[in-house]
Image (tube, grey):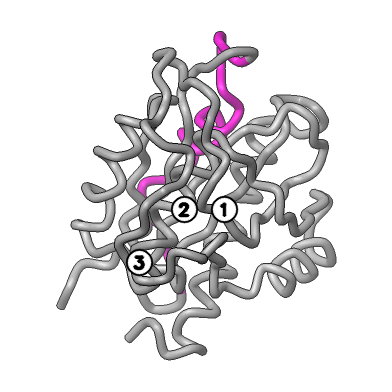
Amino acid sequence: MPQKIVIVTGFGPFVGHEERNASWEAVNLLPDVFPFRKDTYELRKYKVPVTYAEVDRIVPHIWNQQPDLVVHVGVHGQIHTINLEHCSYTSGYCKPDFAKRCLPCDKITLSGKHAAEPECTMLKTNLDIERIAKELNLETNVQCCCSTEVGNYLCGYIYLKSLDVNPDRTLFIHVPKVDEPYSSEQTMATIYNVIGKCLEQLPAERKLP
């Protein structure tokens, strides 16, 4: 039987978050296994340096493992909710990364099924994030929102790269700074709950065996 795998990434330091990145602080607290119904998923966690080159390296490595679900997590210094991101955009990547390097072009070349559509401006997740946010807001004390503003920096870049591979099994979560208002443990618990909600959807959509 093929191994069941969920991969979650968080980011390392960058400008304004040099001492710690709330995304990795929470992701690193996740358990190594994720029990779901009668199955047990291996939960693999990666800390991604905030550079375009590292994203280009790690995204193929992630998908070569044939994960059932990929969840990317990043920090957003201006929010106070857990934001589930609908989409990522194909242009606007002009800002230098943490290594002070820029992409050769602000328009990202796609390689997936939309590669032949030069007018494609965004890729969307096929996961029903409105449903996930609604359910978690009823079940937990952490406020979840849906967003279309993942940004045109490394968060948007890694999301776009994974959506280009498989929009059925990809999600990006933006989290606030630590203790503004949620502790790393609370944020981790929300990420954990989101993973469960995603796994519930995939077999319902016949995207998992």
Q: Which residues are the magenta region?
A: 17-36
Q: Which residue is mark 1?
A: 89
Q: Quadrant of residue 185?
A: top right
Please indicate whether residue 174 sits to the left or right of residue 170 in the image: right
Q: CA distance from mark 3 to mark 2?
A: 12 Å
Q: Earlier in the sequence, mark 1 or mark 3?
A: 1
Q: Which residue is mark 2?
A: 160
Choose between 105 and 144: the one closer to the eye: 105
Q: CA distance from mark 1 to mark 3?
A: 14 Å
Circle number at residue 151:
none
Q: Residues within 10 Å of mark 1 (few under 14, many from 20)?
A: many
In front: mark 3 or mark 2? Answer: 3
- Hey, what amino acid is under mark 1? Tyr
Choose between 35 and 110: the one closer to the eye: 110
Q: Earlier in the sequence, mark 1 or mark 2?
A: 1
| Pointer 1 with pointer 3, Cβ within 8 A | no
At 51% from the left and 52% from the top, the residue drawn is 90
Q: CA distance from mark 1 to mark 2?
A: 7 Å
Residue 140: % across, % down: 79, 57
Q: Earlier in the sequence, mark 3 or mark 2?
A: 3
Q: Quadrant of residue 19?
A: top right
